[in-house]
Image: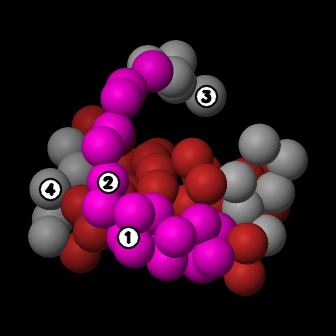
Amino acid sequence: MAERVPFLLRLDPEVLAAVRKWAGDDLRSLNAEIEFLLRRSLQTADRLPAARAHDRVDEASLDADNRHG
């Protein structure tokens, strides 16, 4: 797994509450949910570098991996 880089993110409180609830519904941590949503958005927009094809969103594996983090 690639190294994780800490990053400060400022969010509107309503957006944070909605994503926090979504994370709970998906049994993910808040951080894992944000990363999942960003990766899915990048994949949809075809913005993930080809060299990182292994990072393509695979919901089943992300669900399993992120339930522990």
Q: Is residue 59 shown to the viewer in this render?
A: no
**Is the stretch drawn in magenta largely helix, strand or loop?**
helix
Q: In this view, does 48 lie above or below 18?
A: above
| Residue behind mark 1 | 15
Specify whether 5 is left or right of 43: right
Which residue has dot 2 on it? 11
Of 5 and 42, which appears nearest the observer? 5
- Mark 3 packing: few (<14 Cα in 10 Å), some, or many (20+)? few
Q: Which sits earlier in the primary sequence, circle 4 or circle 3? A: 3
Q: Nearer the viewer, mark 1 or mark 4?
A: 1
Q: Residues within 10 Å of mark 1 (few under 14, many from 20)?
A: few
Q: Which mark is residue 1?
A: 3
Q: Distance between the residues labelled 1 and 2?
A: 6 Å
- x and y percentages locating residue 53 in the rendered image: 36, 49
- Secondary structure of the residue carrying tag 3 is loop
Q: Earlier in the sequence, mark 1 or mark 4?
A: 1
